[in-house]
Image (tube, rainbow, N blue to C red):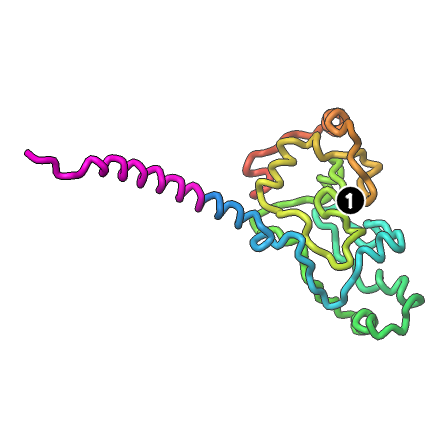
Amino acid sequence: MSQIFHRSANTISRVSIFGAIFVVAGLLALLGAINRSPWVTEARVPREQPIQFSHERHVAGNGIDCRYCHTSVEDSAFAGIPPTKTCMNCHSQIFSNSAFLEPVRQSFRSDQSIQWTRVHDLPDFVYFNHSIHLHKGVGCTTCHGQVDRMPLMWQEQSLQMEWCLDCHRNPERYVRPRDALFRVDYVPPANQLELGRRLVNEYQIQKLTSCSTCHR
């Protein structure tokens, strides 16, 4: 019986199979890169706000501590958005007639909150508690980035689960002394791992990676 397929069919079939594997692997890698890109995560994309509040001006320029505006960050799950009265503590005296700040004055007069655009918005099925992370030595800039260099606020990190898990699995890379939590000029020392291991033990940090830790 004569041979149905040419001998080259064996080579072609092998090349096709391996080629298909490489194509599929390449597509998966591309999808992974897209999923981690700012196009999906919106990381480092400045957000337009009703009033273009500058953290750079208020934090770096005026030296205002995070807790002056985000008053509940040490005691509750939420950092809190400051009421207009907090703004008026200063702006009733400073730039009190600025047209740029008229929406602030109008909000104060009418007792109607300014509708800020949320920057860090986790899915509803994710539980996050600010006070717990601060108590365990996670500083503001670890997650929020150098807000003192942000004329407009943006999301510094991806906020994806793999980013959270990296810290939960390796907290010694990220924790800092509690007296440096709110310092925007804090730079991890050269011996961060040594310091981190000591703080993990001192602050009794557990490497919590079970689903129920965040998905409740």
**Left of 51 or right of it: where is 57?**
right
Q: Which residue is drawn at 72% across and 65% down?
A: 49
Q: What is the crowding at mark 1: few (fewer than 14 residues within 10 Å), some, or many (at least 20)? A: some
As shown in the figure, which amino acid type bears the numbered disc 1? Glu
Segment tinted magenta in the rendering = 1-27
Residue 12 part of the magenta-drawn span: yes
The percent position of residue 82, horizontal first and vertical second, equals: 79, 58
Q: Mark 1 points at which residue?
A: 74
Q: Quadrant of residue 95?
A: bottom right
Depth order, front residue of 102/136:
102
Residue found 56% across the figure and 38% down from its top? 212
Q: Position of residue 98 (x, y in %)?
A: 87, 72
Q: Where's residue 191, x and y in %?
A: 77, 27
Image-quadrant location for residue 15: top left
Secondary structure found at label 1: loop
Residue sitting at 70 percent across and 47 percent down?
77
Q: Does the magenta stretch include residue 3?
A: yes
Q: Give me the residue at 80% from left, 56% from top.
A: 55
Name the image quarter holding the C terminus: top right
- Give the left or right position of residue 26, taking residue 137 as reference: left
